[in-house]
């Protein structure tokens, strides 16, 4: 065989090898889809969250029985059992160690542990939690840098676009599922007290343990936090839009709680007589009962007697619906209110703000019928108080609810709902936080005796 033929065969063989390598590289490259790239980009920032808590149970030799419990309950020591919650989270700030998750994942917590994809484990601190939006922020301390996810934009998501959910369903860490955006602006009753509004609906599989994990777009950007599954059907999951979450996260990091929005107006249920007077065809809904002077509603042009149809995309068909919707609005948001006035439909833009602290005394007098002050030497002498904790009642409005149940000047308030009160500063914060509630519980002290009272506010 001539040298020329040998050289030709060698060149042909080399070309064949190059072709095979090229084909294999091409096949491998084709397998690395945008979904794979997104998961590789974000996977390390998804964490497994476990919270362990204890429950106390009475140890009955006869099993639980109210009759035996009444007679023998004091003789048997309660025993504790450990329970664990499993959920997911995503690191949103690697430098400071902030993790975003669901509030319900950590609500019954004693110890919260965070497990990273690289098997590093940390004990986490709660920065803040907001049950109304089902969001919470945790913090972990790491000597080395932590991976984090890039924030996306949930305002421009498209119905039908591909999305990716990552989480820890049933404890299977970093499980990836894909689907599409099925709908937006969904509302879902989350528990007996809360309705979540403006949710993203997806058919990506979201199972127990996925809660708190990220919903990503095809670029690997965070567009939502997976929060709930619809138990009556398969292929229906929900996520909190990240643009809504950003504002809540900022408050949780800065203050430890969400600063509620001040809208500057109150509403009342529509009754048949009012509907007839206003010439409304609606049989249910709310009308504006009060517009506060100098408030956001007044500046937006809202008037007493306006019939409220919707706030943003959510229909307002009852006072309860109004409360549920406004819970999800944070200070600084601009909302659209759809109303009927004089038979014509109008849309108003209202920019919310923070409720001014100097309006709290008027708010408390109007809703609770009380005037309060710090406990100082003068008030201690005036009311013969022996404590420095709490705030003292200096006046009670006649014909108010608290007056009717016997509350008097000199009584001391130690707690409002779950908020302990040691000064007027504490009470002011609690009054602002609970101002939208129709009733609340106060802990009252009189002559050394403690009383829990339910305060019913006027509508």
Image (spheres, rainbow, N blue to C red):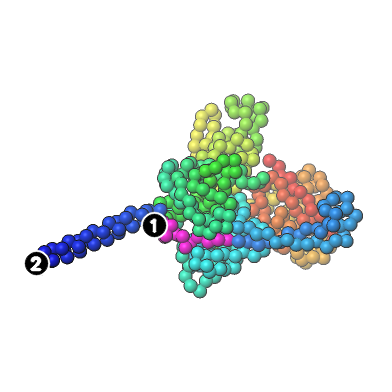
Residue in the foreground of this view, choosing between 100 and 235 = 235
Quadrant of res 107: bottom right
- Residue designated by label 2: 2
Determine if the magenta segment contains residue 68.
no
Q: Is residue 399 left or right of residue 7?
A: right
Quadrant of res 123: bottom right
- Residue designated by label 1: 37
Which quadrant holds the N terminus?
bottom left
Residue in the foreground of this view, choosing between 371 and 48 = 48
Could you tell me which residue is drawn at 55 percent across and 57 percent down? 172
Question: Callout 2: few (<14), some (14-19), or many (20+) C-alpha neighbours within 10 Å?
Answer: few
Magenta stretch, residue numbers: 37-49
Q: Position of residue 193 (x, y in %)?
A: 66, 46
Could you tell me which residue is drawn at 77 percent across and 45 percent down? 401
Determine if the magenta segment contains residue 45.
yes
Q: Is residue 258 left or right of residue 419?
A: left
Quadrant of res 124: bottom right
Q: Is residue 295 left or right of residue 422?
A: left
Q: In terms of secondary structure, where does tag 2 sit? A: loop
């Amino acid at each position: 065989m001539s040298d020329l033929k040998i050289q030709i065969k060698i060149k042909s063989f080399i070309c064949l090898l190059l072709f095979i390598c090229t084909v294999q590289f091409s096949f491998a490259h084709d397998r690395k889809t945008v979904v794979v790239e997104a998961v590789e980009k974000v996977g390390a920032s998804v964490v497994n969250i476990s919270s362990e808590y204890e429950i106390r149970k009475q140890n009955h030799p006869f099993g639980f029985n109210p009759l035996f419990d009444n007679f023998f309950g004091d003789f048997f020591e309660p025993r504790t059992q450990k329970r664990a919650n499993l959920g997911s989270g995503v690191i949103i700030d690697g430098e400071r160690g902030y993790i975003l998750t669901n509030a319900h994942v950590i609500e019954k917590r004693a110890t919260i542990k965070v497990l990273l994809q690289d098997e590093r484990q940390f004990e986490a601190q709660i920065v803040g939690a907001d049950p109304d939006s089902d969001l919470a922020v945790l913090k972990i301390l790491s000597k080395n840098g932590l991976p984090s996810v890039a924030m996306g934009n949930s305002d421009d998501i498209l119905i039908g676009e591909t999305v990716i959910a990552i989480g820890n369903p049933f404890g299977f860490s970093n499980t990836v599922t894909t689907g599409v955006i099925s709908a937006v602006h969904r509302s879902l009753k989350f528990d007996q007290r809360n309705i979540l509004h403006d949710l993203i609906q997806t058919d990506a599989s979201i199972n127990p343990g996925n809660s708190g994990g990220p919903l990503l777009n095809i670029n690997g950007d965070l567009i939502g936090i997976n929060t709930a599954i619809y138990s009556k059907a398969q292929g229906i999951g929900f996520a909190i839009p990240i643009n809504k979450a950003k504002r809540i996260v900022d408050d949780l990091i800065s203050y430890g709680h969400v600063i509620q929005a001040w809208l500057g107006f109150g509403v009342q249920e529509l009754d048949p007589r009012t509907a007839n007077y206003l010439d409304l065809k609606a049989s249910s809904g709310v009308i504006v009962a009060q517009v506060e002077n100098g408030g956001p509603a007044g500046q937006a042009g809202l008037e007493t007697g306006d019939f409220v149809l919707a706030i943003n995309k959510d229909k307002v068909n009852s006072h309860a619906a109004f409360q549920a919707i406004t819970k999800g609005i944070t200070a600084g948001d601009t909302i659209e209110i759809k109303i009927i006035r004089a038979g014509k439909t109008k849309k108003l833009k209202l920019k919310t703000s923070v409720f001014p602290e100097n309006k709290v005394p008027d708010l408390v007098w109007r809703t609770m019928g009380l005037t309060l002050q710090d406990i100082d030497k003068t008030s201690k002498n005036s009311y013969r108080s022996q404590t420095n904790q709490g705030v003292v009642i200096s006046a009670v409005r006649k014909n108010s609810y608290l007056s009717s149940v016997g509350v008097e000047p000199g009584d001391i308030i130690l707690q409002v709902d779950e908020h302990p009160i040691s000064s007027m500063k504490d009470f002011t914060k609690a009054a602002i936080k609970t101002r939208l509630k129709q009733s609340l519980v106060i802990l009252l002290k009189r002559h050394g005796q403690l009383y829990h009272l339910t305060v019913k506010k006027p509508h």
